[in-house]
Image (tube, helix red, strand yellow):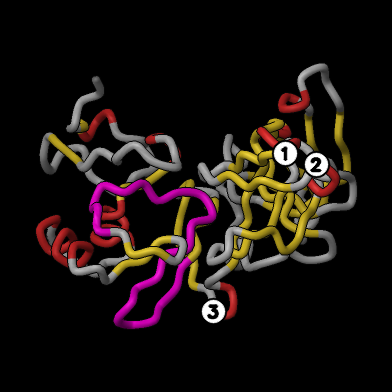
Amino acid sequence: MPSRHLRRYQAPEWWPVSTKETVWVVRPSPGPHPLAKSLPLALLVRDVLRYAKTLREARYVIGKGLIKVDGRVRRDYKYPVGLMDVVEIVPTNEIYRVVPHPTKFLWPIPIGPDEANYKLCRIENKTMVKGGQIQLNLHDGRNIQLPYEEGSKYDTLDTVLIDINENKIVDHVKPELGSLGLIVDGRNVGYYGKITEIIQTYRKRESTVKIVTSDGREVRTIMDYLFAVGKEKPLITIAQQQVTQSQ
């Protein structure tokens, strides 16, 4: 049985907490994102968004139902917030999307209310279920069942744009030449640009991908670290002005 506590030195390096202040830090609850790729809601509220000065204050804000994640009120201060999640501060109507960042790994960026109901999800697996339907298993733990004919057009590692209120697919993009790709893991996390080269290997997830950013920089990664985010432009806001990564 996993420990309910987490020593600060064992926390992911990108978490915005000091290892010298206290011994313990909030451990994320089991949820849609793994520990290494998520941030407990309390730390997001206190250390990133700065809506509280202490953990006690953060727990009070969250317990009062003032924070929504993907359109649902979350009262668990340990709830794991991860890639592409939409976070809403109810009293102020401020809305953020958690996206990859070159130095902070995951970081919230402000988005408009017109995007609050939409989220990009990557298909991690697809299976056949009862009734001849195809079930798409997405990166954030959500599942979508589709008729066989419709589900057949989606492949593993494709990206779908989800209406989070209705859990319905509204758009779709494949990680192919000419598409826009966003790097979500590895040393080049946070960069995005046009996919210009794909070197296929036996394992699809290990195929090498090259993207070219808007400033002409060529960046390589593997398919498993890539999110397709659009064609001519991203389907939704996924980054602020491209940050130049220090060498």
Q: SS of the residue at dot 2?
A: helix
Tag 2–tag 1 contact (CB < 8 Å): yes
Q: Residues within 10 Å of mark 2 (few under 14, many from 20)?
A: some
Quarter of the view holding residue 45: bottom left
What is the CA distance from the residue labelled 1 to the residue labelled 3? 33 Å
Quarter of the view holding residue 234: bottom right
User: What's drawn in magenta, residue-wise?
Assistant: 75-96
Sooner in the amino-acid sequence: mark 2 or mark 1: 1
The type of residue carrying mark 3 is: Gly
Q: Residue furthest bottom?
A: 92
Where, quadrant-wise, is the N terminus in this rendering?
top left
Q: Residue at x 72, y 55 (%)?
A: 229
Q: Which residue is mark 3?
A: 112
What is the CA distance from the residue labelled 2 to the residue labelled 1? 6 Å
Which one is nearer the viewer's eye here, 178 or 142?
142
Q: SS of the residue at dot 1?
A: strand
Which one is nearer the viewer's eye here, 91 or 72?
72
- Residue 191 in percent (x, y) is at 65, 50
- Residue 121 in percent (x, y) is at 62, 50
Q: Which residue is mark 2?
A: 148
- Residue 228 in percent (x, y) is at 74, 49
